Amino acid sequence: MSSTSSRRGKQPSERKSDTLVRRRRRGGRWYQVLADGSERLLPNKPADWSLLDAMTEEEVLKAALADPDAQPLTNRQLAKMRRISPAKRLRWKLGLSQAEFAERFQIPVGTLRDWEQHRTEPDQAALSYLKVIEADADFVARAVA
């Protein structure tokens, strides 16, 4: 068994010269991260869409597929994705935990969890109730208290 670290034998990462590594700092400004670790402020200019507008659909697709950081999702990846349930989206919007949301609006916490985890779907009456909560959460909370 070797006593050397596994990190010693690794080669430094190879970056393509056309790859830009950037970091967003306080104030929303973008900085280029140089190879030595220092940073350079990037100019704050709007995107020039004329280059993209001048490309054909085939050229746009070819350029998009050539970008290693923005590869399209495969059918397998798409199949694994799920939409966020309306109950979870509403709960996040209100900034409440599952227990707080369930208690505030008189919904059993187990039912709320089932909706959020897609074990069951809310029926039409429950969906309507969620829409009313979204329209005026404070009123509904007072009404069911």
Image (cartoon, rainbow, N blue to C red):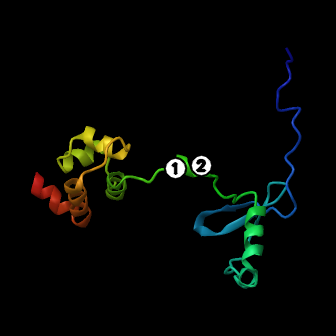
- Mark 1 in CB contact with mark 2 (< 8 angstroms): yes
- Residue 134 at x, y percent in the picture: 26, 63
- Residue at mark 1 to residue at mark 2: CA–CA distance: 7 Å
At a point 24% along the width and 67% down the height, the residue shown is 135
Q: Is residue 54 above or below residue 71?
A: below
Q: Is residue 42 above or below residue 96?
A: below
Residue on which disc 1 sits = 81
The N terminus lies in which quarter of the figure?
A: top right
At a point 76% along the width and 80% down the height, the residue shown is 55
What is the tally of numbered marks visible in this picture?
2
Question: Observer-nearest residue: 6 or 89?
Answer: 89
- Residue 100 at x, y percent in the picture: 26, 46
Furthest-top residue in this view? 1
Tag 2 secondary structure: helix
Check residue 5 in the rendering and tell me which mark sits there, or answer none: none
Tag 1 secondary structure: loop
Residue type pointed to by label 1 = Met
Question: Observer-nearest residue: 5 or 141?
Answer: 141
Residue on which disc 2 sits = 77
Residue type pointed to by label 2 = Gln
Left or right relative to 32: residue 99: left
Q: Is residue 25 above or below residue 74?
A: below
At a point 32% along the width and 41% down the height, the residue shown is 113
- Residue 81 at x, y percent in the picture: 52, 50
At a point 70% along the width and 58% down the height, the residue shown is 71
